[in-house]
Amino acid sequence: MDNNNTTDGQRKATANRDSNAKTKMRLDEKITSVAFGRSTKIDSDKNAPRIRICVLGFAAVGKTAVVVRYLTNRFIGEYCSGKDLLYKKTIKIDGFPSQIEIADTSNKSADLSFPSVHVSWADACIIVYSIESSASFEAAATMLEKIQSIKMPFYHPVLLLANQKDLEHLRQVRVEDGQALALQNNCHFAELSAAEDLDGVELTMTALFRDVRTLKSQRTAVRQKKPSLMHVTKLFSSLIGRSSSSSSFNETDAEKPKLKSSSTASSLHTGDECEIKVNTPTEKEVKSNKGIKKRPSFSL
């Protein structure tokens, strides 16, 4: 009986530990790392800087098609989009390696809860809509507003991507509408076809990655240039010391005796102890216009 109770207690303790471990897992471990129906090995370089991208959009707009097209150069028309997928790969941008992580969300409709946790996790977002679906464009506009509310007041790179350009005969969203929405939200814009435009997909994605990497480098440089607390303390101490010495100097000057305005002024010169006399014209010399042309004589 006691053994059974001990076993139950151990099982409960183990279950609690597992539950706590799961709650402490990072987001990238929560997102299912599965591609093409099987687990994939992470092709990554731990020393390379990491760039995290979140891909959002309405159902059936080609989110996964765009991501897979970029990573593998292949195009597959149909995907099982019931799960969130995380793709990891090390690429080179301008000759320098970067570890990219792309979270492909599985929003089936605009009514589903917005993946705010994914957006907070990401360094940048890609919002995909289809040119032949006005509903997907409206959903993209709503997503842009929510991203702005989450990331404000900081700048967050966003790419508004119009997909399925090959379905021109079914177009419902004009190019000008997409450009205006991107301009309104201060984000990048591109219109392409994941099925037919491999170069367009590569150029667009690489431009976004480059923007993220540059932004992260700038923020790192700013953090490194911030003065330390010790430096600020020394700076204030030096300023206070200068202020104190300046005020003491002024107080010393104020304590010095002032010479009275009289016909003869005398003072003692410190150290030499010599008398200084100032001779001014007398009243008679002034009346007789004497002494006016000559400067007062000073005798030591």
Image (spheres, rainbow, N blue to C red):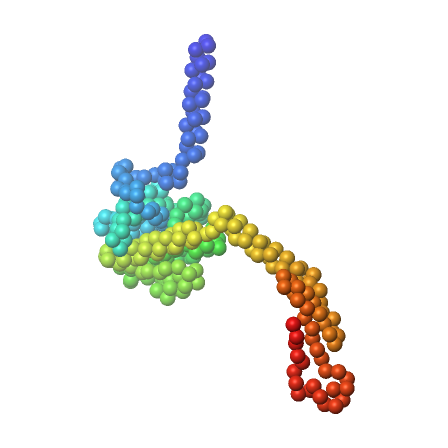
- Residue at (72%, 72%) from the top-left corner? 265
User: Residue 120, percent across and down?
Assistant: 43, 47
In this picture, residue 146 sits left or right of residue 40: right
Q: Is residue 271 left or right of residue 77?
A: right
Where does the C terminus fall, quadrant-wise? Answer: bottom right
Q: Residue furthest top?
A: 1
Along the line of sight, the residue nearer the viewer: 10 or 251: 251
Image quarter for residue 33?
top left
Q: Position of residue 100 (x, y in %)?
A: 31, 47
Residue drawn at point x = 27 percent, y = 53 percent: 93
Whole-percent x, y for residue 107 in the image: 39, 47
Residue 251, position as x, y percentages in the image? 67, 59
Above or below: residue 25 compared with residue 57: above
Q: Is residue 56 visible?
A: no
- Asked whether the viewer can see residue 91, the reply is yes
48 or 227, nearer to the observer: 227
Determine the image quadrant of residue 88.
top left
The answer to whether residue 109 is above or below residue 189 is above
Q: Residue visible at 42% across and 20% down?
A: 11
The residue shown at (60%, 59%) is: 246
Q: Residue furthest bottom?
A: 288
Q: Nearer the viewer, residue 267 or 272?
A: 272
Query: Is residue 79 depicted above or below 194 in this figure?
Result: above
Between 239 and 173, the residue placed more toward the observer is: 239
Q: How many marks?
A: 0
